[in-house]
Amino acid sequence: MFFKTGLLPKGLTETLKVQFKSGETWRQLIRQIADEPSWEKGHVDFHLQQNVGFYYRNIQECAQYLLRQRAYVDSLVFEATTEYDQNKQRVYSELHTADWWVEKQRLLSPNVTVVPILLASDQTHLTNFSGDKKLWPVYMSIGNIVSRVRNKPSAHAWVPIALLPVNPKRMSGISGWTKKDQGVDSLQVFHDIMRTVLRPLVQLYEAGGVEMLCADEKVRKCVPILCTWHADYMENINIHGIKLNLCPMCTVPKEALG
């Protein structure tokens, strides 16, 4: 009965008594109902490969999409709090009990709501038989959704925000362009792409926030701020541009590491 609400695709006869004619048509109808943020396509140039495409979503629209979901109405937090146990010791549990949220709130107007942006990425190897296919997705969630809900796969609280181009394989024997130069080029392209994806956060912060409709049907002035980026060690090397097996903070020499 849910699909008999006037969503009949063009060209589908009434005699079929259904509102979709294939799995893809059904998914298209679901996407129309969900009103998910649309994808945009960009292009970047590697030194050895030109006009490489990548896909991304507007990070502001993704934050708005998560905030307005009625499924999270009882699991959303909009302000920082401090918690203490019976011995008056500070207790840290959810993100809104951390010092980070308190400090960011002090920098903003009292009537502004902080929306912590959480990112996660991991370059994934797909197959060995069709050209060593790889996928490099970046996912996003918001810290306003409590972790017990946000971390449940069935809650769908993480949405893909970018599909990054996989770096071309490094080649030897190229005059004036060593493998080290190729690695630096790939890192620069990665940061150029993420600058494009994250630019709306800078613009919104400088503008003092934007009004967003929340799941409780209230409109709040929100400022999305990048909070954390979940990634493994190799991914962190790309994100922060650090050297493999070395740390700028640690005093332990490389030979002493496990």
Image: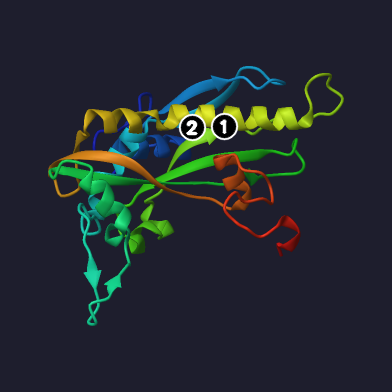
Residue at the image point whose x is 68% and y is 47% from the top: 244
* Farthest-out residue, front: 251
Report whether 250 appears left or right of 222: right
The residue to which callout 2 is attached is: 194
Q: Is residue 134 visible?
A: yes
Report whether 13 appears left or right of 131: left
Is the residue 75 above or below the residue 225 in the image? Answer: below
Residue 190 bears which disc, if any? 1
Q: Which element carries disc 2, helix, strand or loop?
A: helix
Asked whether the residues under the numbered discs 1 and 2 touch, taking CB atoms below 8 Å apart as contact, a structural biologist would say yes
- Residue 231 coordinates in the image, percent (x, y): 54, 50
- Residue 122 coordinates in the image, percent (x, y): 57, 46
Judging depth in this view, the residue of 52 and 225 nearest the camera is 225
Residue at the image point whose x is 65% and y is 22% from the top: 46
Q: Is residue 144 visible?
A: no
Q: Which element carries disc 1, helix, strand or loop?
A: helix
Is the residue 200 above or below the residue 23 in the image? Answer: above
Residue 33 bears which disc, if any? none
Q: Residues within 10 Å of mark 1 (few under 14, many from 20)?
A: some
- Residue 162 coordinates in the image, percent (x, y): 48, 35
Judging depth in this view, the residue of 167 and 251 nearest the camera is 251
Quadrant where the C terminus is found in the figure: bottom right
Mark 1 → mark 2, Cα distance in angstroms: 6 Å
